[in-house]
Every structure is written in C-alpha cells, then in structure tokens.
Amino acid sequence: MTKTRALSSLAHLDGARTYWQTLMSVVCYLVVLLTAVSIHGEKCVLHKHLTDVEQWETQVSFVGRMKASFVRFHGEFMNETTYGPLGEDEIQRECVASYADNKYIYKWQEKSATLYRCYQLMPISRNVVVMKVSDSMSDFKTASNLCSSDEVALKYVDWPLISTKQFPEGRWNDCGIEGGFDFYVRLNGMEYCQQPDNSMRPRLEVGCSKEPEMNFDFRNNFNCRGFLDMTLQQKLTCLGSWQRGPYKFSVVTDDAALWPKLWLLRFPSNIPATASFEMLVLPDIMMDMSTAPVSVEMSYVHTLVMKRTNFATVCEDEATAITCGHLCSDEFESDGVPLDDIHCQRSCNKCPHDQGLCLFPLETNGEWLEYDDTGTRRVALTTSMMYVDGLPPTKCLNLTGTLKNKQPLVSFYKNGCKPDYRCVYLHARGPNVVQYAVSEVLQWPYKNHLTSADICEAEHFTFPSSPYSIPDPRILIRTVGKQPVDCKIRGTFRFSGKRYKSVNKAGCSGVIKSCDFKDVFQIEYGKNCNEISQSYQCIASFDDGPSRILITEGEDRLGRLNQCWVMHRFKDDIHTTVYQVPLSSCHVPHLSVDRRQENGDYVMIYNVSAAELELQDERSCGDHIQMTTRFIAKTKTQATSQKQMELITQHIPPQTPTTEKPYNISDVLVLKASSGAGHTKASISCLIILLMKMIMMMINRV
C-alpha cells in the first residue's frame, strides 16, 4: 500500500513538473515578445486626428504666406511639400515603427543615404498638432532606443500643424482662457486706448453666454486696434490650446471662407483674478516653446494689457466716470465716435426698474427631466432660481410688466463675463409635466429702462435650437412623486392599415382601448402586425390649441419609458390624426408638415374618427365600435428588413456641436490607446490571462 502511494505521488509530481515546464515556456515566450516590442516597435497606426485631415498646413506666417508648407499623412507615409520662390520641394518619409506616447520612427532617403528620425506627434485637438523630433541618424537601432525611452528629451518643432477644417459635429475646442477682460494695445512703445479718461476700453470675451467663440470688441474705434488685422467686432474660433511652462498657447481663426486668417495667442497659464496681465498676439503661428518671453521688438507682435472686469448687477456704468459725466445730458462723442448713454445706466438713471426677484409658479417648483434629441438633462426650479445642467444659474427678474407663462431671467458671472438675460416659458400641464422653452441670450446692457416685454418678445424664440436656447416648448417630467391622471379619452377603437414601404402587403390591424381605467389605454395589435401590444399610463393630458397632447409612461419595445401622443385635426380632413412622437418633438408647431411625407419625423400615425376619438360615453367600451380608419407607421429609412421595420421612435437630431476636451502636452498618454501599441498589448493581455488559467489548473492538480 505504501509503495503504491509513493508511486502515485511520483507520478503526480511528474505531471506537475510537466505543467511547470510548460509554464516556463510560456513565460519565456512572453519575455521574448515584450522585449521585441520594446526594441523594434510595432506596426504604425497613427492617431485618428492625424488622418482625419487630408492636408495639414505649417510654417504659417504673417507675410502673406509667401512660403507655404503642407503635410499629408496617408497609410504609413508622411509627405511634406513646400512651395517657395524657387519652386516646389517634397520629401516623403515612411513610418517603420511606433511606440507609446504617439512616437514613431520615420525613414527617408537623402543623397543615397537612409536616415531615421523619431517623431512624437501630439494632437492638441482635431485642428492642431504639436511635434517633437530627434536628430536624424543613420542607425535604426539607435533611433529605436531613443524613441522607446521616456528619459530622452526630444526637441519641439517651432511650427505646429494647423487645419481650419470644419467637422460635421462642429468645432468646440478649448480656448485656454475664459471670461471677460478690458484691455489696451501696446506696440513698438506706443499704447492705444489706454488713457484713463478714454470712454470705453476695448474688450475681449471668451466663452461668455456659453458660446465657444472668442470675441474682440474694439468699441467702433479704429485707433484701438494698433496694426492688428482684425475687424472692429472680430469673432474668432479657437482651433486648439495647450500649456508649456508658465504660458498657454492658443491658435485662433476668423474662419473666412476663402483664405482664413490665423493668429497665435500667448498668455499666462494662471490668469490673475484682479491684476493686469499681458497677452501676446502673433500672426506667425511659430511657437517659441521655451519659457523665455517672446521678443516684443518685432513690429507685428501686439501686446494686449488685459484686466478682468466684473459686473455684479444690471445697474452699472460700463464707460468711465469722466465719460458718463458728459454723456448723461446728450449724446457724446469720444474720438469722433458717438456713444449712447446705455453704457452709463447707473449715472444716467437709466437702469431697469428692478423690483427684486420674481416668483416662479408654485406648481413648477421641483426637480425635472428635460428631454431633447440627444437624451435628458436635469432642471431644478426653486421659488426664484432655475438650475439647468450645462447652464449658469439664473434668477427670476422682477421687471416692469407681466406676461402669461413667461418670466425674464438674469445670470451673473464671476469670471468677467457681462450679465446676460434670457426669457423662460413655463406652463404647468398638471402635477407631472411642464412645457418649457428658453429664449436666445441677450447680453447686458441691452436697453435702457428694460422691461419684461423687451426680454420676452416673440422674436427671441425664433432661432435655431442649441444646447443653451430652446425656441420650441419641450417637456419637463417630474423626477419624483408623479401621479397618474385622466387620459380624457374613452372608448374602443379599431384600426387597420400598413406601413410605408412595408413588405407586409396585408397590412396591420388592432384595437386602441381606454375602458378599464381612466388613466390607462392599451394598443392591441393583431397577429398580422408583428408588433408587441402595450399599455400606457397617462401622466398628462391637455389641450394645446387645436390639438390634445398625452404624455404617457410605459416602456416601449425600444426601452423608452415616456412617450408623447399628439391628437390633431387638420382642416382638410374628416379624421383626427394621432401622432406618437419623441418627447423632444412634443409640441404642435411640428404638425404643420405634411403628415403623408415618407421621410417625416413622426413614427406612428393613427387616423381615427374625430367624433369617436373624443367620445366620453363609457357605454362605448362595451360596444366595440367598428371603425374603417387607417393606421400608418413610418420608419426612418426605406429599407425593408425586419429589424429596420421596427417602430423607431427616435427623432433625427440636428448636428449638435460637442465639446471636446483639448489634450495637454502632459496628458498625451491618453492618446496611445488608438495607436498600434494598443493591439499588441491586447494580445499580450490575452496571453497573460491564459497563463493565469494554467497556474490555476496546476494548483488544482497539485
């Protein structure tokens, strides 16, 4: 017995030894693989931002771009073409290896010799790329060791790569600076518009009213510009910003259609709260990446002496005291430019008749969800304050005049931005739902003796929708404490019909029922519909002009919890049409479109008899009224596959710009996941997982 156990133990040990030998083989393989990766690099896969742009521009100079240089990335090649007085010069370099932190080795031929260089290509945004390079060398291994090391410093290239391409989703790049600043210009020892008695200092505003642009306002005074090649009211778009040492840099453009102008701005990375600071404006997009100050000897480098200016109320003087002393009597001219007393509202007693804070209707107080084309955002209303995700807090402003369901709002900022006005439309539609719209932004000072009607004019609700302004009423749904309400429809209604472009020639039939409970109705589909029957509970039912709107709860087949139903009677039709629409489109103005268009925004259309739809007689619930009306369901596409024939209830959203956080040079590690290194590391991860499984197997065997 003892001998048998001993033999068994030896056999067990032999098996374990075999597993450990296998384990060591795998470990050796991993070590060799990792060594190969670190020494020889990986297949070149460039960051997506580099290849999204067909052609990058560099060596951008204020001298009319007499020397133009362009860089193109295609596949594993980088082509640099320079056009100058002596003609065209082109160099093609081939990427032969890639490393972490967006580093690549490129090789090229020069005078029959093969040269190598390590490039670090750092996308600051989709429109700006900063480069660092090594010296050229003839040995690949030396270049590889240099490129794979984190300790060897590469040299910055003076000229970044620039693209003014506009992407479909828009360009919302960080400018590196935010707020409002008064400034004057210093150039070659001359100072412009800096006198203390000057009526209005030029002003820079960035990101105010949540607009991404940068706006220079020279107060209609040409003398204040120095030799800056800008308009008096210059709006600029930020292409990208980054930090180097104590400074930040930002590339901006005027987005001109034919030949967009470009400027480089340099300013302190830490903007003082109250003290003055200097911003350099260079028409050459040539970065001196050292921390030494850029020479102000150059005649085209403008120094803007800036200071943040805050406005705590809407009753302030924007002009200087000396100017306001003259201005309150009549119009006043400064440097030949007429000024209105709107900039001296306090001194001239032209402030709005502010009577403190107004009160929102009590039934609108609480926490709500706003539904738009991209999802939801939170809205909170207190007695006098409104808080919306992505917007500054706003106060309900009690001005002269009252308007039904509309309240003027004001926002104040601590970063130097001027106060701004909005108008909010709030209409409670029962205990659970509020219709809600927000006007365009009006910047202070807007008008002397401002009233509620000035802010809430109808024309301020007639502009395209944006994340910050909502011209058409949207639905707010209470987040907690919802109560069921009467749907205000009673009866049993049969429907039949078919979808547009449907392969089901027989059509679809079913029943709409609202009998068992006043706050619930059902849609029961026939077997020929390939649809799922569903019950919906009403949380709001109200009339809006010639239409009735129902807001319901009940998860549909796409997982959407809330739905909107609009019942509308057209003048030229004997039927009442019932639309099931996304909550973001739940308002009557959308119904002015031809409902029979195949590419319309509405998903389901029920055409039923107006008389029977509005029937309140409960006896109809037992009669099962037969109807000869139509049921039409639209799809977003004209494809005929079963998946695409589902009731797609998402409204096609407009292209909404999205904010993209720019990359700091110190943060470029986040970009390496898109390079070729990511694929190899994923494979290594799989091998490590396999290794762990083998270890567990051996432990279990032992």
Image: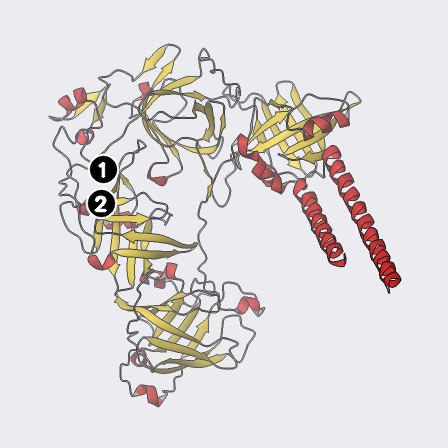
Which is more toward the observer, 133 or 438?
133
x then y, percent, for residue 447? 20, 37
Task: Check whether the beta carbons of the residues at disc 2 and disc 1 lie within 8 A of each other.
Answer: yes
In the image: residue 692, left or right of residue 188: right
Residue at 63%, 34% (x, y): give it: 102
Give the residue number, with chain letter if any, for mark 1.
446
The amino acid at mark 1 is Tyr
* View extreme (front): residue: 2
Task: Examine the rendered structure and indicate whether residue 596 appears above or below residue 296.
Answer: below
Res. 443 visible in picture: yes
Which type of secondary structure does the marked residue at label 2 adopt?
helix
The residue carrying pointer 1 sits among few (fewer than 14), some (14 to 19) or many (20 or more) residues within 10 Å by Cα, namely some
Residue at 36%, 50% (x, y): give it: 465
x then y, percent, for residue 171? 47, 40
Q: CA distance from mark 2 to mark 1?
A: 9 Å
The amino acid at mark 2 is Ile
Image quadrant where one finds the C terminus: bottom right
